[in-house]
Image: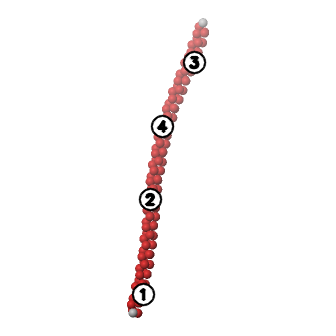
Amino acid sequence: WEAHRVSEDAAEELRMKLAAAEAQGVELRAKVSSESASREKAVSAFLAGEVDCRLLRESVETQLLRGEKAELELRQQNTQLQADMHTLKANEQRLESAVALAQADMHTLKANE
């Protein structure tokens, strides 16, 4: 009878150890699941950050291209304006020469009268 009781005590102790191990296993599975979820969130955040960076880079590159295009257009306009200024100056000199000739002709006409 004593051996039977020792055997039951050992069995009870083993059952308690098994229950504790099962509880510990449940805790570990919950912890692994939680860490896995955290890892997935971190990966998702990282990928979202990469997408945001790529979109930002593309936006900046687009703006730079627009800026370069605008700068080129302004340079072309500036070149055209400079050409127009030279044309205006030449026309102004021709007009001044024509006025001077007309005044000379007026003096000649008055002198001939």
Please determine whether, in this image, residue 64 is positioned above or below residue 48: above
Q: Which residue is mark 3?
A: 100
Q: Is 110 displayed left or right of 7 in the figure?
A: right
Q: Nearer the viewer, residue 33 or 15?
A: 15
Looking at the picture, how far across and down is residue 6, in whole percent?
41, 90
Looking at the picture, how far across and down is residue 34, in whole percent?
45, 67
Measure how far apart labels 4 and 2 are at the Cα level: 43 Å
* Label whose residue precedes the other's in the sequence (1 or 3): 1
Q: Which residue is mark 1?
A: 9
What residue is at 57 percent from the left and 18 percent from the top?
100
Q: Nearer the viewer, residue 105 or 18?
A: 18
What residue is at 43 percent from the left and 73 percent from the top?
26
Measure how far apart labels 1 and 2 are at the Cα level: 52 Å
Q: Tell me the SS state at disc 2.
A: helix
Measure how far apart labels 4 and 3 are at the Cα level: 40 Å
The single residue placed furthest to the front in the displayed view is: 1
Three-letter residue code for mark 1: Asp
